[in-house]
Image (spheres, grey):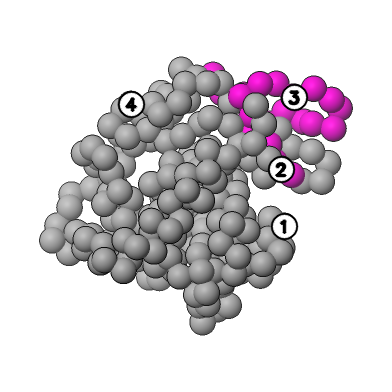
Amino acid sequence: MLFGAFGGGVWLLCWGGVPIAMADVYKYADAHGNVYFTDVPLKGGQYRLQWHRESGQLAEENRSRFSQLQIERSPRGESKPLSRSLRTRRARYEALVSANARRHGLSPALLHAVIRAESAYDPRAVSSAGAQGLMQLMPATAARYGVADSFDPADNVSGGAAYLRDLLDLFDNDLRLALAGYNAGEGAVLKHGRKIPPYAETQAYVRKVLQYLWAERPVHVTISSVPGED
């Protein structure tokens, strides 16, 4: 089963150590830079295998990743409950988020947390830096992932999810580094030795998304602190 030109597969993040899916995942790339996630090997010389994860390995990686995410939560770290209007906007994009989570091998909860932090589910949102739409794509990032209209929710979430998937791959599934890269660019994370850059905005962003991810949890999850939080 193949899930499109920018990703796919059946690899989802786990909550509480319980894997959401148990299929092997293969990652391929083609000569045009498109990335494919699939649960079966692809045939043809146009596809280059980048990695193959067995289902047991995926489950263990996900369990290990979330066991490392440990945070001592204080009142200031609590995420406020969603307002009625925010719940309404969130529900509007539930199916879209779930579809892109499956396509790109992500947790729907993670995509919801990023969208909430980026735009509060406002598809017309524009930042002072020029980022646009639900997942606040910069024009260069939108072009990189083939997003024709950043204000189109389907186009925007597809591109943002693909970018987040690539960041997780780049940083060996380190969620904090992937989020830092999403905010400041992967170049900034690499420049600072594959660590969260010492930017107040980026560190606050990582904390915020982790708090929103916590709020999405169906079971108890512990999340690690971000440098500079204290």
N-terminal-most mark, 4 or 1:
4
- Secondary structure beneath dot 1 equals loop
* Residue on which the image places disc 2: 5
The residue type indicated by label 4 comes to Val
Identify residue for label 3: 42
Whether residue 76 can be seen here: yes
Circle 3 — which element? loop
Image coords of residue 1 (percent x, y): 65, 26
| Cα gap from disc 1 to disc 2, whole angstroms | 10 Å
Calculate the distance from the C-alpha at mark 3 to the C-alpha at mark 2.
13 Å
The residue beneath circle 1 is 146
Range of magenta residues: 34-54
Dot 3 or dot 1: first in sequence order is: 3
Q: Residues within 10 Å of mark 4 (few under 14, many from 20)?
A: few
Give the Cα distance between marks 4 and 1. 34 Å
Q: CA distance from mark 4 to mark 2?
A: 28 Å
Disc nearer the start of the sequence (1/2): 2
Pick the residue in front: 202 or 39.
39
Distance from label 3 to label 1 (Cα)?
A: 22 Å
- Tell me the residue that label 4 is attached to: 18
Circle 2: residue type: Ala
Helix, strand or loop at mark 2: loop
Viewer-closest of 141 and 157: 157
